[in-house]
Image (cartoon, rainbow, N blue to C red):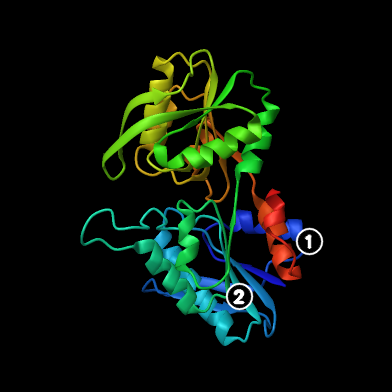
Amino acid sequence: MKVFTGSSNTALAREIVDYLKIDLGRCVLDRFSDGEIHFYIDENVRGEDVFIIQSGSSDANSHLMELFIMIDAFKRSSAGRITAVIPYFPYARQDWKDRPRVPISARLVSDLIEKAGANRILTMDLHSPQIQGFFSIPVDNLMAAPVLANHIKTLKLEDLTIVSPDAGGVGRARVFAQRLNAKLAIIDKRRPAPNVAKVLHVIGEVADQNVVIFDDIVDTAGTLTLSANALVKEGAKRIFGASTHPVLSGPALDRIDKSKLERVFVTNTIPLTERAAASGKFAVLSVAELFGEAIRRINEGSSVSSLFA
């Protein structure tokens, strides 16, 4: 087994190999003067079980191209098996035709990863679980819920309610609420345009409750902060956010800093910017152990799903 990393999240990659008690694979990844990606593998990988860690983030297009080039290099170097470890799968929100004449970008990315030569995918909290069906190779979709739930348990919050910020996330929030033995509430939200959310009302009792707004992605934080405002109006006490992927684009940080959110719990599938890390509103929980254990089990041919039993 050998583990290599692209440039998107080297800190997470180092944590993963520390858990596995191995060294990162030796390779060179940089840019030519015109911006094209330059990559080569600096050790023998013939017949090896190779894992490439590369997440989507603020520069998803560049990081995807890095991943394609890296996979191609390992395929041409006769690696035994190539697993693309993608903690945050980019373009996952474009997984169906919500109007005429639009692409299904998630399917396109899936096709490109397969065409490059990946034999297996390891990811976390796909925005739409059905994306697994876009692949004809095995896909392991890990869940960050155990990591987030275990941290929230340490807060010893009484009268706890988990809030889904929209109808689409109810299933995800229900499972999370069961882990915490908490109540469930739902925000009735409409989205008139991409990255624009409008909260209508809260379904469920949140008065005098400590609430955690649970979602898979925090992007512009419009949904998160509007939900927090709605919960304040309904009489909620302490308000927290919990999310797997801290995309945090555009006005997200300003919105969160000005909001009634006491704290937002996120994982390190995407590295926080310096400004986000300094804001004091975020608590970052590591998923390195979860990915490391999944990699070990894939390499050994043992069960990955039993991690969540």
Distance Cα–Cα, label 1 vs label 2:
20 Å
Residue 212 x %, y %: 53, 28
Q: Which mark is residue 309?
A: none
Point 73% across, 66% down: residue: 23
Residue shown at the point (48%, 14%) measured from the top left: 207
Amino acid type, callout 1: Lys
Decide: few, some or many residues near mark 2? Use Cα within 10 Å; few <14, some 14-19, many ≥20: many
Q: Which residue is nearer to you in this view: 24 or 245?
A: 245
Work out whether 17 lies above or below 149: below
Confirm whether residue 187 shows in the render: yes
- Mark whose residue sits in front, 1 or 2: 2
**Residue at which label 2 appears:** 82
User: Residue 21 bears which disc, if any?
Assistant: 1
In the displayed structure, 269 sits above or below 303; it is: above
**Horizontal and vertical percent position of residue 69:** 48, 76
- Of the residues under marks 1 and 2, which one precedes in the sequence? 1
The residue lying toward the viewer, choosing from 27 and 16, is 16
Q: Quadrant of residue 14?
A: bottom right
Q: Residues within 10 Å of mark 1 (few under 14, many from 20)?
A: few
Left or right: residue 172 compared with residue 16: left
Q: Position of residue 26 (x, y in %)?
A: 66, 73
Quadrant where the N terminus is found in the figure: bottom right
Q: Amino acid at mark 2?
A: Ile
Residue lying farthest to the right in this orientation = 21
Q: Secondary structure at mark 2?
A: strand
Q: Residue 52, percent across and down?
A: 59, 68
Q: Do the CB atoms of the residues marked 1 and 2 lie less than 8 Å apart?
A: no
Q: Is residue 15 visible?
A: no
Residue at position x 37%, y 40% from top? 220
